[in-house]
Amino acid sequence: MEENVKTIKFLLLILVLTILLTYAVHLNIEMNILVLNSPWISNDFLFAIFSGGLASAVIALLLEIKQYRLNKISAKDQIFKNSALLYDEFSVIKYTLLRIKEQPDNIVSPQAFDIPLSICGQIQTSLQNIHYIPIWGSDKTKEAFIKTNELLTNSISPFFWDVKFIEQAVIYDKLLELKETGKSINPTYNSYYTKRTVDKLICDITPIVDEFTVCMNNLAKSLGRSEKWKQMYSDFAQYEENYNALSLEKYLGG
C-alpha cells in the first residue's frame, strides 16, 4: 500500500501540472498572448501534448486508485483475520495455565505451550508485515491497528518469553526434590517453583487478555466487522466453557 500511496500522490501532482499547462495553452490560443507558429512548435502542438498527458494522467490515476482499493480491502481482511487468530491462540495459553492450576496433581508439561507459542509467533510476523496506509493522514482503522500493534509489542510479545520460564521452573523443582530427598520427580502445580511461576503468569496474562479484548472491539468496529467479531468472541467463550469442563473423567463418564 505504501507504493500505491506514493504513486497516487505523484500522479495527482502530474495531473495538476498537466491541467494548469493545458489551460494555459488554451488561454494563449484564445487570447493570442504569445504567438507560437514556427515549423518546430505551435500552440496546437503544445495543446495536443499537454491534453494527451492530462488524459494519460487521469487514466493512470484511476488505475492506481483501483489497485489501492483492492490492496486496502486485502490489508483489512488480513488485519482482522490475523488479529482474531492471535486472540484465539493467546486465549489458549491462558486456558492452559488455568487448567494447570485447576488440576494441581497433574504433571506439568512445558511442551503444552509449544504449539500455541509457535502459532502466535507466525501470526505476529504476519501482522508486522501488514502495511495499512491511508492516502491522507490517518483513519480509525489505522489508529486501532496501531493500538493493537503497541499491545503486541509492549505486552503480548514479552509474555511469550515469560511463558518459557515454566520450563525453568520444572527443572528447578526437579533439582530441588533431588537435592532434598534424592528422588527424581515430575513436578506438578503443587511444586514450589512451578506453582509460583504459573500463578505469576496467570496474574500477568489476565489484564493483557482484557486489554486485547478492548483492542479487538475497536479494531472490528473500525473495520466494519463488529457483528462477525461478536460471533467469534461468542465462539471463543463457548470454547473456554468447554475447555474448562473437559476432563478425562467426564469424557469416560466418571
Image (tube, rainbow, N blue to C red):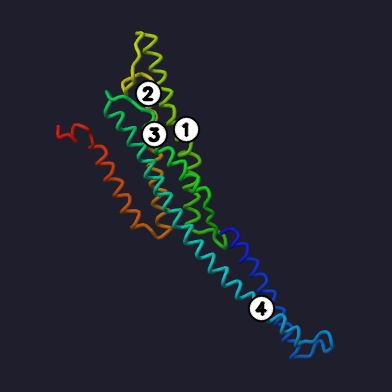
Between residue 188 and residue 213, name the one nearer to us.
188
| Residue 137 in picture, x, y percent from top left | 57, 60
The answer to whether the residues at label 1 and label 3 have Cβ atoms under 8 Å apart is no
Which residue is denoted by mark 4 in the rendering? 54
Q: How many marks?
A: 4
Distance of label 2 from label 3 (alpha carbons): 17 Å
* Measured Cα–Cα span from mark 2 to mark 4: 70 Å
Residue designated by label 2? 196
Residue in the picture at 36% in, 8% down: 182
Separation of disc 4 and disc 1 at Cα? 56 Å
Tell which residue pokes out farthest to the left in this image: 254
- Say which amino acid is labelled 2: Arg
Q: Tell me if 245 is positioned left or right of 231 in this view.
A: left
* Mark sitting earlier along the chain (4/1): 4
> What residue is at 47 percent from the left and 62 percent from the top?
73
Q: Secondary structure at mark 4?
A: helix
User: Residue 48, image x and y in percent?
Assistant: 71, 84
Q: Kindly report which numbered mark, 4 or 3, lies closer to the viewer in this rendering.
A: 3
Q: Earlier in the sequence, mark 1 or mark 2?
A: 1
The residue where tag 3 is placed is 113
Q: Earlier in the sequence, mark 4 or mark 3?
A: 4
- Against 138, is 114 above or below? above
The numbered mark, 2 or 4, whose residue comes first in the sequence reads 4
Residue type pointed to by label 3: Phe
Badge 1: residue crowd in 10 Å (few <14, some 14–19, many ≥20): few
Q: According to the image, label 1 marks what residue?
A: 161
Q: Position of residue 23 (x, y in %)?
A: 70, 83
Other residues around mark 4 within 10 Å, as few (<14) / some (14–19) / many (≥20)? many
Is disc 2 surrounded by few (<14), some (14 to 19) or many (20+) residues within 10 Å? some
Is 46 situated above or below 17?
below
Distance of label 4 from label 3 (alpha carbons)? 59 Å
Q: CA distance from mark 1 to mark 3?
A: 11 Å
